[in-house]
């Protein structure tokens, strides 16, 4: 009986393998065909041996790429001092404040001057906590598997953000010089504090939903939310320090001489030394080839404060965006921008070029996806914000490459900056925030359209900078 049983068992296994293949699994027959297509030769063996102890980028790096050594810029905006966000996701905040401090440095002849990132980060985390808790109240009647409720509990808080957060936070809380509320360990290393805050917010979210299910009135839920935020405030104050309500400060010029001193509140300091209405002065431009151009869009829940502004932008071709950027740089005005910085980035040179790494030759295949295809499949999205400050134009005024001031410290990249070829910018730039005075009137008129609302979980906004 055993031989017959073994034969029947083998037939059953073969049938199962055939069925698995029909159902989409990898059968033994399919695996055999896959293996037959592998080419085993001296080059394959050498490559396998090399990659066993070598980073892929080391072998894929293109030798002799001219973009790797060309750092000349025909037009740049002057700046002083490179900031460092350390182990945090606050690039959006550093970039926004870098735009403001560059204007202050130019206007008042300052030396290496910084605005406090820690000060605004404190209020950013408090405001985002309130945004989450109030959104939980607003959606309390929906089930836990509702898409919005699910998204909220997946994303109660983050240290990432966008320029609309800079706008709303600065206009509400003002700014202070860096020495008034300096960086500390937890502002530079946000992950532990963030995980604790998210855990607490999720707990509070469930409590608020229970209150709603019990029929508690809006007033009672609002009072409980205030108590919850008091605990969040305490955690932030312990980790980051408590923000000043008033401070004394002396302005020094580039030679170190005091040119003005006084006592300020964060808002009076902003109004005196910056003064610009960030909401009214800037427009947000976007390059998203998955959607029609010259249309205005807004992203639901993509804001930092409950009473603030969602990220709202005009979608435009790259050629239009670049002309506006050139006009701003020529007038010595920096811009907030964001891109997919990890793609084709050479950390040794600080150069971003589509010709930095040849993965196709290394793995004997191709990677032909377009920008639109990468966006729609989550392969590319905005991941990092920087400050656009330079462009190299040819004799006909066409851009060859671009320069940004980064927030990874002075030893990172090219003296704290990154150089991007124009071709790379076409593929990986997503957002540019620019002063209205550099934008054609016809383009500003397009911003008056009623924006098309996009969901918070749209592919392009899943990887917030």
Image: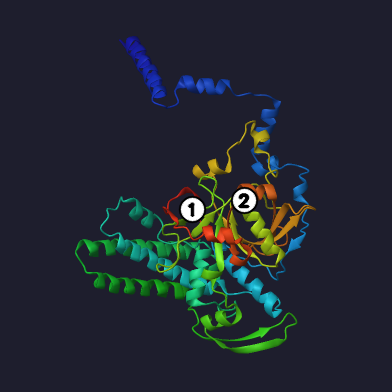
Query: Can the viewer see residue 343 in this picture?
Result: no
Q: Which mark is first along the chain, 1 or 2? A: 2
Which residue does the numbered mark 2 point to in the structure image?
318
> Which quarter of the rendering shows the N terminus?
top left
Residue in view at x 42 percent, y 27 percent? 25
Q: Does dot 1 land on a helix, a strand or a loop?
A: helix
Of 363 and 453, the residue lying toward us: 453
Tell whether 403 sits left or right of 118.
right
**Residue 204 % position (x, y):** 32, 65
- Density class for disc 1 (Cα within 10 Å; few <14, some 14-19, many ≥20) is some
Answer above or below: position of 82 versus 393. Answer: below
Q: Position of residue 21 (x, y in %)?
A: 42, 23
Left or right: residue 200 compared with residue 221: right
Residue 327 lies in what quarter of the image? bottom right
Whole-percent x, y for residue 392 in the image: 75, 56
Q: Residues within 10 Å of mark 2 (few under 14, many from 20)?
A: some
The dot on residue 461 is 1
Mark toward the viewer: 2 or 1: 2
Residue 377 disc label? none
Kindly check if marks 2 and 1 are in contact, taking CB atoms under 8 A apart as contact: no
**Which residue is more in the foreground, 455 or 404?**
455
- Helix, strand or loop for disc 2: helix
């Amino acid at each position: 009986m055993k031989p017959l049983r073994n034969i029947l068992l083998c037939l059953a296994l073969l049938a199962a393998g055939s069925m698995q293949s029909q159902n989409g699994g990898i059968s033994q027959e399919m695996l055999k065909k896959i293996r037959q297509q592998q080419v085993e030769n001296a080059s394959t063996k050498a490559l396998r041996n090399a990659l066993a102890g070598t980073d892929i980028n080391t072998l894929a790096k293109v030798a002799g790429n001219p973009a790797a050594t060309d750092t000349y810029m025909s037009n740049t905006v002057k700046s002083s001092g490179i900031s460092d966000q350390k182990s945090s996701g606050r690039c959006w905040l550093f970039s926004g404040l870098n735009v403001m401090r560059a204007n202050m440095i130019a206007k008042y002849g300052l030396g290496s001057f910084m605005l406090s990132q820690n000060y605004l980060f404190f209020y950013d985390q408090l405001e985002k906590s309130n945004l989450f808790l109030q959104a939980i109240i607003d959606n309390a009647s929906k089930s836990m598997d509702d898409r919005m409720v699910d998204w909220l509990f997946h994303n109660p808080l983050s240290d990432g953000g966008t320029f609309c957060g800079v706008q709303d936070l600065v206009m509400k809380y003002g700014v202070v010089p860096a020495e008034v509320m300096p960086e500390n360990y937890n502002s530079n290393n946000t992950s532990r504090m963030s995980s604790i805050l998210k855990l607490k917010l999720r707990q509070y979210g469930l409590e608020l939903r229970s209150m709603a299910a019990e029929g508690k009135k809006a007033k009672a839920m609002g009072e409980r939310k205030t108590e919850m935020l008091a605990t969040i405030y305490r955690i932030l104050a312990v980790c980051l320090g408590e923000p000043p309500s008033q401070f004394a400060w002396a302005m020094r010029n580039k030679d170190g001489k005091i040119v003005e001193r006084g006592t300020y509140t964060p808002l009076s300091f902003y109004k005196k030394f910056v003064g610009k209405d960030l909401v009214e002065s800037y427009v947000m431009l976007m390059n998203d080839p998955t959607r029609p151009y010259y249309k205005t869009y807004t992203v639901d829940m993509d804001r930092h404060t409950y009473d603030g502004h969602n990220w709202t932008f005009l979608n435009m071709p790259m050629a239009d965006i670049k002309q506006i950027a050139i006009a701003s740089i020529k007038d010595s005005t920096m811009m907030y921008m964001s891109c997919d910085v990890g793609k084709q980035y050479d950390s040794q040179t600080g150069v971003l070029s589509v010709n930095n790494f040849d993965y196709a030759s290394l793995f004997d295949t191709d990677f032909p996806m377009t920008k639109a295809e990468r966006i729609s499949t989550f392969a590319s999205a905005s991941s990092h914000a920087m400050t656009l400050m330079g462009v190299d134009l040819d004799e006909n005024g066409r851009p060859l490459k671009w320069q940004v001031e980064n927030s990874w410290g002075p030893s990172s990249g090219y003296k704290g900056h990154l150089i991007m070829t124009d071709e790379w910018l076409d593929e990986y730039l997503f957002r540019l925030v620019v002063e209205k005075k550099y934008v054609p009137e016809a383009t500003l008129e397009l911003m008056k359209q009623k924006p098309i609302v996009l969901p918070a979980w749209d592919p392009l906004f899943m990887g917030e900078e």
